[in-house]
Amino acid sequence: MMADEQFTDSGFWNKIKLFSRQAGREVIERALWLYYAAQQPNTPKWAKSVIFGALAYFISPLDAIPDLTPLVGFTDDLGALAAALTMVTLYIDDEVKSLAADKLALWFGDKPTEPKV
């Protein structure tokens, strides 16, 4: 089964909803960057495959480090997201960052910070 077949919108949003505070702003921000980059029509198929692979790992209940483990549970997720971001950084544009910043401000209730890649 290919990564983009394992990824689902509903699985992504459910994971974000359940674990956003526990995962922290940094993990959620990167997940959103990837999610919104995958939605852009100019993102090539190979980049979407990389993105969907990382997001499928992010939403998977089977992690190298369980997400319920205090403090370190999302370390492996952040690593997978960071690796994907490195490969597809050209497709993380201002529009993608703006969409993610708006969602973060809504969920975390604070002003978005200047995004770092």
Image (tube, rainbow, N blue to C red):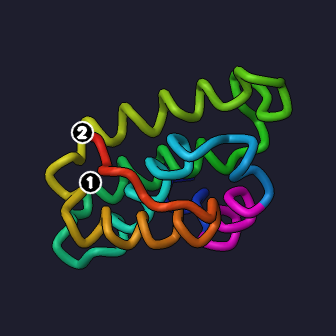
Q: How many marks?
A: 2
Q: Secondary structure at mark 2?
A: helix
Looking at this view, name the residue that lies furthest to the bottom.
41
Look at the image and give the residue range highlighted in magenta.
9-17
Looking at this view, is 101 or 90 the one in front? 101
Looking at this view, is 62 or 72 the one in front? 72
For residue 104, side relative to residue 87 (left or right): right
Q: Are marks 1 and 2 in contact (CB under 8 Å)?
A: yes
Q: Earlier in the sequence, mark 1 or mark 2?
A: 1
For residue 55, side relative to residue 46 (left or right): right
For residue 33, side relative to residue 54 (left or right): left
Looking at this view, is 109 or 88 the one in front? 109
Mark 1 crowd level (few <14, some 14–19, many ≥20, 10 Å Cα)? many
Q: Where is mark 1, residue-wise?
A: 47
Name the residue located 20 percent from the left edge and 58 percent from the top edge.
91
Q: Quadrant of the C terminus?
A: top left
Placement of 102 over or under 87, stated as above or below: below
Q: Where is mark 2, residue-wise?
A: 87
